[in-house]
Amino acid sequence: MTLTDATNAHPSNDDAAPASQPGRLAPIEIAPETFVIHDTFAPPGAPGAVHMNSMLIRGAQPVVVDTGAPTNREQYLEDLFSLVEPEDVRWVFISHDDVDHYGNMHEVMAACPNATLVASWFACDRIAVDRLDISPTRWRWLNDGESIDVGDRTLHAIRPPLYDSPTTRGLFDPTTGVYWASDCYATPVQGPTAFVDELDPDAWAGGFQTFQAWNSPWVTMLDESRFAEACSVVERLEPRMIASCHGPTIGPSQVDRAFELLRLVPVTPIPPQPDQMALDQIVATIESLILPLPS
């Protein structure tokens, strides 16, 4: 699938998604009526970049899956509403309470008058500490292991094996075999990347294991057998695709390899994170680029 396949994704040619712009990916249909909406962020001093993706299931009752980061708000809303009419959106699923997952939630809910926010009690409680200006009459609480009927399919909230928030739930669509893994099964990239097939296998494996360990540092304390059982919960779903917020989509040819890599994370040495020396180098680089004011 090409990076501009989303231009043909909408039933009406007049409403096609915008073409890919330099440095970003247009929305890509990874399965029938299922689109990954891309964003890519390069943190200061990082050797690469990380995705900030979200997803749309455009079924009988369209489901927005996470709402992206506020730093990408204008482009995210443009991409989302190039694929679906705001009045048609029925559900807005928030996987957990990190801002890169709910960063445009208020804007989406305001634009979509028929949408219900699908979260959990704990997620709503934690988001409300900052801001939750959506009436409880528009909420639906969905816990790990529970399901929701969205008209032409039933979606299942299944928590991924690794996560950085206690509110995390993934979302599995048995109709397409797509599993939204939230932060799990992700990897850093050098730039916008649609599928892990585009990555060097060794670079993917190293980045994959590093991301999981940095995002869930408690993984080194886990009993291997109990962690393997947590992994098997997702594996038994037999997903055909794994999409995540922070990595390229894992296609059918790489799903089994992703399962193998995740099981190895508790026993894989964790590389150190950038330290003060790295920050000093970043600051020195910034200062070297600032021209002195004329006297």
Image (cartoon, rainbow, N blue to C red):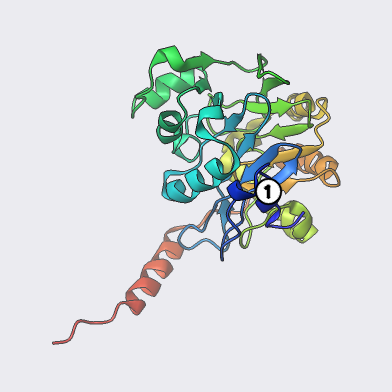
Percent x, y of residue 56 = 62, 36
Q: Quadrant of the C terminus?
A: bottom left
In this view of the protein, can residue 134 be seen by the observer?
yes
Residue position marked by numbered label 1 in the rendering: 28
Describe the element under mark 1 as helix, strand or loop.
strand
Residue at horizontal 48%, vertical 43%? 77
Q: Residue at x 44, y 64 (%)?
A: 277
Quadrant of the image for the N terminus? bottom right
Examine the rendered structure and indicate whether residue 93 appears above or below residue 137.
below
> Mark 1: which amino acid?
Ile
Residue visible at 67% across and 29% down in the picture: 160
The spot of residue 123 in percent (x, y) is 47, 22
User: Is the residue 130 above or below the residue 186 in the image?
Assistant: above
Relative placement, left or right, of 74 versus 292 is right
Q: Is residue 268 visible?
A: no
Locate residue 143, reporting x and y percent.
59, 15
Between 287 and 278, the one nearer to me in the picture: 287
